[in-house]
Amino acid sequence: MILDRYLVRQFWPVLVVSVSMFVLLLCLIDLFANLTRYLNYEVPMKQILLISGYFVPKSISYAMPISLLFAAAYVLGDLYARNELTSIFSSGIPFWRFVMPLIVIGIAASVFSFFFQDIVVVPTLKQKNFLSRIALHQQRSESNSDIVIKTRNGQVIYSVDYYDVSASVLNGVSIVEQGENGEFISLIRAPRAAWNGESWDFNNALIYAWDNGFLRVAPLAPTGAYREQPDTFRRNAVDVEDLPVKDAAALIQDLKNAGLPFVGAQAEYYHRFSFSAASFVVMVLSISMGGRFKKNILLMTLSVSLIVTVIFYVMEMICTMMAQLGYIPPLAGAWFPILFFSAIGLLLLRSAKT
């Protein structure tokens, strides 16, 4: 349809300029946030530019929703200010039919955002963080303390005071073994356990177990029965945002199997899907706002787009944080902002000019 092609031709240049502007803004914010530390550590300009370059895909991911919101609202507002929308509506074309190309673009942008995040953003952001830590001399310790881990379907429970990752040594070890029905079988306590490549060697370990109705204690004989891998006790240095969706799901399952906290990782996993849907939601919002401004269209559209985006990201951040802390379910924390703004967009569409 001629009008479809006309609307798309009006939309694309504004979208490209919007994405470029917001990506540049986000990259500059990231650069100036670390500029002082770059100068303190005398990081070469080439290295700084390389780190900033790896941040561009993530900036595109962040900039896409606000750019779609601004571009669609500005184009519709501009068409209304030039009385083109009035002519179109007078010819009998419904509003929903006229903006259908924008709806299709919003759906396509959501699909593109998901795969772009999984294929491009994840590896480049991981590399950016890696190079940034090297340049700023930041180290991530994988040693861990105050560890409680369930293994073998919850029948074996480890309690460890401190795990030294460099030596593969557990300090202050207590191991409770229970039956399938949760009955107590034994308790092993040892000041130290070292990994020999296949199993844990306990130092001066004692075992408490029932014997003819009495709880007896005896030195633990050498045993190779405890083969939980050292990585099980290591501090989780992998963030869900550094992993593709498939690997993130596997990480969450591993955390569940090990009895480690997984709610935060699960909230980030669901957020990966909900954030992709933001492109479609903001497109609905922008269509509902189109034609509401007759004067100062550029300024008003940009202002409203920034305000709506800030509110959306703040709400998203709060909901994600509450989900990670366990105050709300992870699924609700990820999808509530999307559903909330979708409802607002649909309500505004009811009063949109037709």
Image (cartoon, grey):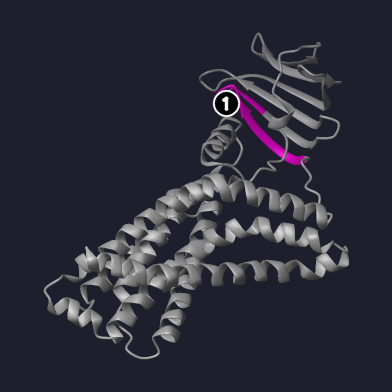
Q: Nearer the viewer, residue 190 or 229?
A: 229
Tell me if residue 52 comes above or below residue 352 in the rendering. Answer: above
Q: Nearer the viewer, residue 169 or 189?
A: 169
Question: In which quarter of the view is residue 37 placed?
Answer: bottom right
Q: How many marks?
A: 1
Tell me the quarter of the image containing the C terminus: bottom left
Q: Residue at position x 31%, y 58% from top?
A: 104
Tell me if residue 334 comes above or below residue 159 in the rendering. Answer: below
> Circle 1: is it few (<14), some (14-19), or many (20+) Cα within 10 Å?
some
Does residue 154 belong to the magenta stretch?
yes
Query: Which residue is farthest front?
Result: 2
Q: Position of residue 62 (x, y in %)?
A: 53, 62
Give the extent of the magenta segment.
144-157
Instruction: Report if residue 69 is visible in the image.
Output: yes
Tell me if residue 194 comes above or below residue 349 in the rendering. Answer: above
Q: Residue at position x 68%, y 41% from top?
A: 236
Q: Is residue 88 left or right of residue 132?
A: left
Question: In which quarter of the view is residue 144 placed?
Answer: top right
Query: Which residue is farthest top?
Result: 212
Q: Which residue is mark 1?
A: 154
Secondary structure beneath disc 1?
Answer: loop
Q: Position of residue 17 (x, y in %)?
A: 50, 72
Q: Position of residue 198 (x, y in %)?
A: 76, 16
Q: Amino acid at mark 1?
A: Gly
Q: Residue at position x 35%, y 55% from top?
A: 107
Tell me if residue 299 comes above or below residue 305 in the rendering. Answer: below
Q: Is residue 28 left or right of residue 71?
A: right
Q: Residue at position x 64%, y 21% from top?
A: 177
